[in-house]
Structure formats: C-alpha cells, structure tokens
Image (tube, helix red, strand yellow):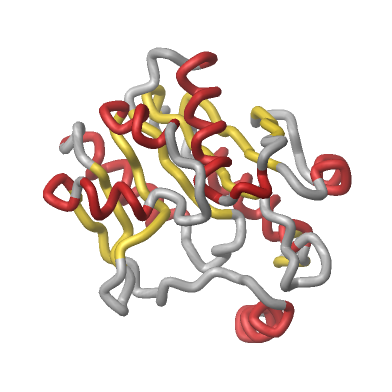
Amino acid sequence: MPKHSKIAILIMAAGSSSRMGSPKQLSKWKDSNLLEQTISKAIQLKSEAVIVVLGANSDKIIPKIDQNEVDILINQNWNLGLGSSISEGVKFIQMSYPHITGVLIILSDQPLIELDHYVSLIDVFAIRSKQIIATKYNDGKLGVPAIFDSLYFKDLSELNSDTGAKKLFSKYSDNIISVNNDQSAFDIDTYKQYLELYRANH
C-alpha cells in the first residue's frame, strides 16, 4: 500500500466507558483488544502519523497497546466530550505535522469497519481534496470514519462538546462527499452491545 504522507490519522479513545463498567478500549477483540485492532488497521494505511487520543484510564490503557508507530496524546479535558479530544488532536497535528493536508478521524469502538473502507475514504480524498469525505451508513446517516481537509482544521480545533465532528457535517453539508459502508452506524457503548457484537463475530 502506498504511503499517504499528507494524511494524519486520529484515533479517538479518550472516553471513560462509564456504561461499560471497564475501559472498553481494552475489551477483547480477536487476538488483542478493540483499541489495538484499530491501531493495527491505522498503521497499515501508512499515513504520515497515527495519533491515539487517550483520556480516562490512560494509565491502564497505555501498557496494553503497541506504542512503536503511534503518537500518544493525553487529553486532560476528556470529560468535556469527544469534541474536546478531536480539538486537542488537531491542535497537536498543526503543531507537530504542519505539512499535513487532511486528517482521518476514526473511533476505537467500531471494530466492524474494515481496512478497505478506510482505503476507500483516502482514495476519494486523493482526488477530491478541500472536501469532507464522510462515511454513509445503511441507515442513511453520515458519520466517522471521515477525512477532513486542512481547510476545516480551525473548526475542528474549536470543538468542545460531545457532538464531535457532526457539527461540521451540518455546517458544511454542501462540501461533503459520502462513501457508503454496508454496516449500521454502530459503536459500542454498553457491555451488552459488546457481548452481542463479540459473539456475532467470533
């Protein structure tokens, strides 16, 4: 796979997993855990940088993941929500990787997103820059994983709520290109959801 040198990847993994009862980032998936599986896929994309944004339970999570090819960023204000973690991640990219032209934002709790889907998003971004390349699920909703051109970094860096990047989907609706994914917009919030998904895929 060619190196996508102008794209950084932000893996969002800062939440407290309050409805899970334990850090869902470390929930078993295949031969490792949810976060490690996400990191592995991101590394295979050969981007310029992979940044893992942690917050709650970072002291428990860090020893359980491979840190060799990623930057670990701790958001001390993780309790302010997903938007705060995206903001911190984008600020870090602007400071540490100023030549980056786009950021791919992915969640650590969407194990059904396959590597091919990330590649499809990147392929579209390669020919349609200055846009937002979002995932369109089979229920018609737009969401992450999504790639944002650097034109939107200012907006991303100013997020501070739990709505994440959805605010930009509304604000820049005319600038969105969607890539279909045949999954539902499913991420893991509760232990029951995790068990159902685990049993269905193992």
Which of the two residues, 169 or 6, is positioned nearer the viewer here? 169
Which of the two residues, 141 or 127, is positioned nearer the viewer here? 141
Task: Write the residue at 24% across / 34% down.
Answer: 126
Q: Is residue 196 above or below residue 61?
A: below
Q: Position of residue 102 (x, y in %)?
A: 35, 30
Q: Position of residue 36 (x, y in %)?
A: 70, 50
Task: Write the residue at 45% across / 44% down.
Answer: 105
From the viewer's perspective, tell me whether residue 127 is left or right of residue 193. left
Which of the two residues, 9 or 158, is positioned nearer the viewer here? 158
From the viewer's perspective, tell me whether residue 36 is left or right of residue 85. right
Q: Position of residue 148 (x, y in %)?
A: 32, 38
Q: Is residue 166 above or below residue 188?
A: above
Residue 72: quadrant of the picture:
top right
Task: Write the residue at 54% across / 32% down.
Answer: 89
Residue 184: quadrant of the picture:
bottom left
Task: Write the residue at 77% across / 48% down.
Answer: 56
Quarter the N terminus occupies: top left
From the viewer's perspective, tell me whether residue 139 is left or right of residue 161. left
Q: Position of residue 19 (x, y in %)?
A: 72, 72
The extreme left residue here reads 174
